[in-house]
């Protein structure tokens, strides 16, 4: 399948040596959307959760301290930029690197919260993210071994061999685990249960975008 | 039906997720043994056949990539040669010390001080340089997170005592649950007394 069929006509490339980022309408749309959202996050403040206490009229406010706020904002901006990069990358290995960066930054965003449950599930997610290194990079390496190239432009014109399909499947498992879609959703979904809404949302948004982009990559190379 | 419900409940527990993931990944990798291995020999990032440079008696075997220092480029392939115009120059470069070692003895080829700029450097820092930037930024993020946590949760812990501390929260939670338990017990006792009075009547 040709690249042109999926995302519209290629409008241009950004050559960085062997890594060529290519732009077509779909990628530009995703890229601009995530950048706009990142900009919104960079200028917003966090929410404060208000919990009503059991058996009394008091309420318990869970807010984010200033230091933690700064750290989280920094990490979520990095997460947004990494997601934006993954949207326009034209290289398989580059994509997996962006994915790994998003994974580690996601853990970082929730690493400073003070709820024990959230930290526990972040730990479990961290275990998955570590394991995902094997399928993500292994899958990319398998596709490199089967075809001799990593560029999506070249891969689009090479017919799929069994080993390529297997490599893509292995990568798919990696992306599923790292972005926490079913059936691996629980640990990532539990990570959200903490104040600091706009920063927490980018965890969710980045995995959504990554899934869309990865499906497009799969359809392109297979 | 109840079995499926139980399965869903197990899936909702974060503790089980890494195990499930590892299981699925393991099964897939085992299934991978059945896939026929179709290696493409026409790779972009090629290497000479094992031992071929040793047998040819090259001084910096097995890392000799051809070319002369600052005169002609070595052999490097790139996916898009038009994007890397100085291809091969890093590959053929050697420091003066490395050049001297190369002249003295044929046995320093594998040592780091005698190896040329090298095919690895050329790919890492030139043709695929953007990957190296990303890799090191992943490391940097990991260090930022770890050092931030170390500074704010181990060194400054005493200052913030009693204010949103995890231990305090846990203590408070235990105390409130104790209180609720005792309230429940009290109301139970009252209800039982009432019941006893009713029966007595």
Image (cartoon, coloured by chain):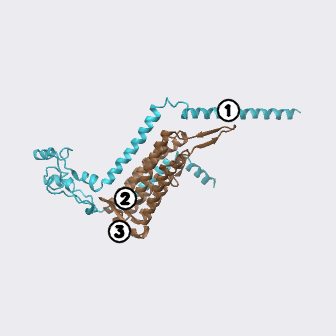
* Location of residue A215 (image quadrant): bottom left
Quadrant in which the N terminus of chain A appears: bottom left
Mark 3 → mark 2, Cα distance in angstroms: 15 Å
Q: Quadrant of residue A220?
A: bottom left
Residue underneath mark 3: A157
Mark 1 secondary-structure assignment: helix
The residue under the point 20% across, 58% down is B75
Identify the chain drawn in brown. Answer: A
Q: Colour of chain B?
A: cyan
How many discs mark residues in the rendered view? 3
| Numbered disc 2: secondary structure | helix
Residue, x 19% and y 47% (percent of image)? B115
Residue A222 in sight in this render: no
Q: Position of residue B77 (x, y in %)?
A: 24, 60
Tag 2, which chain?
A
Q: Position of residue A158 (x, y in %)?
A: 35, 67
Label annotation for residue B179: 1
Residue that badge 2 annotates: A92
Is residue B128 shown to the viewer in this render? yes
Mark 3–mark 1 Cα distance, whole angstroms, equals 69 Å
């Amino acid at each position: 399948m040709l690249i042109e069929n999926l995302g519209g006509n290629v409008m241009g490339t950004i050559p960085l040596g062997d890594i060529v980022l290519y732009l077509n309408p779909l990628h530009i749309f995703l890229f601009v959307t995530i950048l706009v959202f990142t900009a919104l996050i960079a200028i917003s403040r966090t929410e404060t959760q208000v919990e009503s206490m059991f058996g009394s009229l008091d309420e318990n406010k869970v807010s984010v301290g200033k230091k933690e706020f700064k750290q989280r904002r920094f990490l979520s901006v990095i997460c947004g930029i990494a997601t934006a990069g993954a949207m326009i990358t034209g290289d398989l290995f580059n994509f997996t690197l962006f994915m790994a960066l998003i994974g580690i930054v996601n853990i970082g965003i929730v690493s400073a919260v003070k709820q024990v449950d959230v930290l526990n599930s972040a730990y479990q997610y961290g275990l998955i993210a570590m394991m995902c290194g094997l399928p993500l990079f292994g899958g990319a390496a398998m596709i490199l071994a089967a075809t001799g190239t990593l560029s999506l432009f070249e891969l689009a014109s090479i017919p799929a061999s069994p080993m390529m399909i297997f490599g893509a499947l292995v990568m798919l498992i990696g992306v599923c685990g790292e972005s926490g879609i079913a059936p691996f959703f629980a640990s990532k979904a539990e990570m959200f249960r903490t104040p600091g809404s706009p920063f927490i949302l980018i965890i969710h948004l980045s995995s959504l975008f990554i899934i869309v982009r990865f499906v497009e990559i799969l359809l392109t190379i297979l | 039906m109840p079995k499926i419900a139980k399965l869903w409940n197990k899936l909702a527990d974060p503790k089980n997720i890494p195990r499930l993931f590892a299981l699925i990944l393991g099964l897939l990798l085992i299934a991978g043994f059945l896939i026929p291995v179709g290696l493409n020999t026409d790779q972009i990032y090629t290497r000479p056949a094992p031992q071929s440079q040793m047998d040819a008696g090259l001084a910096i075997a097995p890392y000799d990539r051809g070319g002369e220092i600052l005169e002609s480029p070595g052999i490097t392939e790139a996916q898009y040669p038009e994007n890397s115009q100085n291809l091969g120059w890093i590959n053929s470069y050697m420091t003066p010390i490395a050049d001297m070692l190369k002249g003295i003895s044929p046995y320093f080829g594998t040592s780091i001080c005698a190896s040329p700029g090298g095919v690895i450097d050329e790919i890492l820092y030139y043709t695929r340089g953007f990957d190296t930037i990303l890799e090191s930024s992943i490391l940097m993020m990991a260090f930022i997170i770890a050092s931030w946590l170390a500074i704010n949760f181990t060194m400054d812990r005493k200052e913030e005592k009693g204010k949103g501390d995890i231990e305090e929260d846990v203590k408070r939670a235990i105390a409130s649950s104790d209180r609720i338990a005792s309230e429940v017990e009290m109301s139970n006792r009252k209800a039982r007394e009432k019941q006893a009075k009713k029966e007595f009547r």
